[in-house]
Image (cartoon, helix red, strand yellow):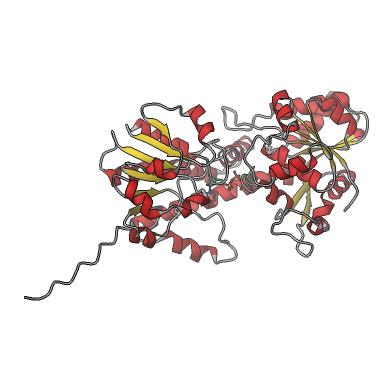
Amino acid sequence: MSSSIQIAVVGSGYVGLVAAVCFAEMGHQVICVDNDQRKVDALRAGDTLIHEEHLPELLGRYRNTKIKFMTDLSEATRECNAIFIAVGTPQSETGDADLSYVEAVACEIARSLTKYTVIVEKSTVPVYTNEWIRRAMERNGVARHLFDVVSNPEFLREGTAVADFLHPDRIVVGADSERAAAMLSAIYKPLTEGTYYTTPGAIAGSCNEHAVPPLLLTSTKSAEIIKHASNAFLALKISFINAVSNLCEATDANVQQVALGLGLDSRIGPKFLRPGIGYGGSCFPKDVAAFRSVADQLGIDFNLLAEVERINVSQKARFVRKVRAALWTLRGKKLGVLGLAFKGETDDIRDSPAIELVKMLMAEGCSIVAFDPAAMSRTKEVVPESRQMSYADNAYAAADDCDALLILTDWSEFKDLDLDRLNKVMRYPIVIDGRNMFDPAIMSEAKFTYISIGRPTAYPVRDAVPEVAAV
Ligand code: UGA
């Protein structure tokens, strides 16, 4: 494997922590810095803080060897050659990204910098952030030859974060200096040259020594725009298929067939064409708003993004109408809910469409019994147990005696539910699936009324009527 580089990663959220353990896995020495002492203590003790495949394993492997956790950014700055900034960039009231954490980190680095260091933006940031970091460094007295600022956006998804990091579709490096580009190329060499994939115990994924990820070198501004444009485009694909699914519902067509037919065109591709209750999470809603705000500030007409957001919001109201249409009235109805996280295989509930729907249905007077394999304790903090809201230990308990069962998060384990058992515990066997998890024909066989997104409603098959002998 290539030579080891001393890397600091500032911020131990999703992107920072995953980047830190993956850099260690790639052979580098890593210092992970966070100003939250409790987080640092937990990480030192081996607690990953988030539910993410491979993370406990990698943290266990490197926690006292190649990766150190600390709160002291000055010490990390003195020891490292590259500092990745992976702190939060939350949405401000005006929709644009709040960059105050990024600025604070840049100023702190500036105070301790004594040798050439590459500062890398890893957080999702709007175009021009790179220039602002450079200005902040200079204003704090750092000589220009002592640093470069590079943009290296991250494309990992929650739930598959470690595998995505180590098996990326592409690595984007926005650098305006050759020296900085060379440092980033050296950091990613184990992936781009494929040596990582031949290491015993390497995390498996789509890349191997013969199919390595490309490293795309761009200007810093292009790299910043690539990140925002990628998330906005993916959100657009989802809103597009959601709008098409509404058209399918109005015509009794089947959106699954339509998405298949669309996705087989290699120019369109099959991914991110799953209709549902709208996109959520900590990235798409915030990043689409931030990208729109960037366009507004630059006087660019990008109303397409407002439409993407509008469709996304209306998809939830549409789902509530679906529930009402199935149950006639909502007040006093008992609904089982499967899934609270913003998508399956994660405990993250930030901007979760499932939770928004739970709140909307509670406001309509429904009572909810919810189950999620990982996100219940987090949800209890925002929707506490009450007369209208309770939490079940498993899917069958959530469905018990309910008027309808709603599927709001695409946890893969829901696919393995025992449909007979589910049917027997429900008061009325009505399933309203916001994620199209089941085949309507199978639900019909299992004697459910099955309502999904953009597909014709399936009704319970009738038991064969015994032939009556002619008299
Ligand atoms: C997203 C991007 O996919 C990552 O590439 C990016 O790095 C990340 O944001 C980020 O900027 O940090 P993530 O938020 O983890 O990743 O989740 P996705 O898998 O993209 O799903 C986002 C939302 O879209 C979820 O609510 C999901 O249920 C929904 N979705 C996704 C659909 O409704 N339909 C689809 O076909 C795909």
Judged left or right of residue 362, residue 31 is right
Judged left or right of residue 228, residue 83 is right
Q: Which of 440 and 56 is in front in this view?
A: 56
Please tell me which residue is depicted at 34% across the width and 61% down the height of the picture: 445
Residue at the far bottom in the pictured view: 470
Q: Where is residue 309 in the image (x, y as percent from the top left)?
A: 50, 42
Q: Where is residue 468 in the image (x, y as percent from the top left)?
A: 13, 71
Would you say residue 318 is visible in this rendering?
A: no
106 over 121 or under it: above or below: above
Judged left or right of residue 50, residue 355 is left
Q: Position of residue 18 (x, y in %)?
A: 71, 42
Q: Nearer the viewer, residue 422 or 319?
A: 422
How many badges with numbers are in the image? 0
When asked about the image quadrant of residue 283, the answer is: top right
Judged left or right of residue 52, residue 462 is left
Would you say residue 432 is visible in this rendering?
A: yes
Q: Quadrant of the C terminus?
A: bottom left
Q: Where is residue 110 in the image (x, y as percent from the top left)?
A: 85, 26
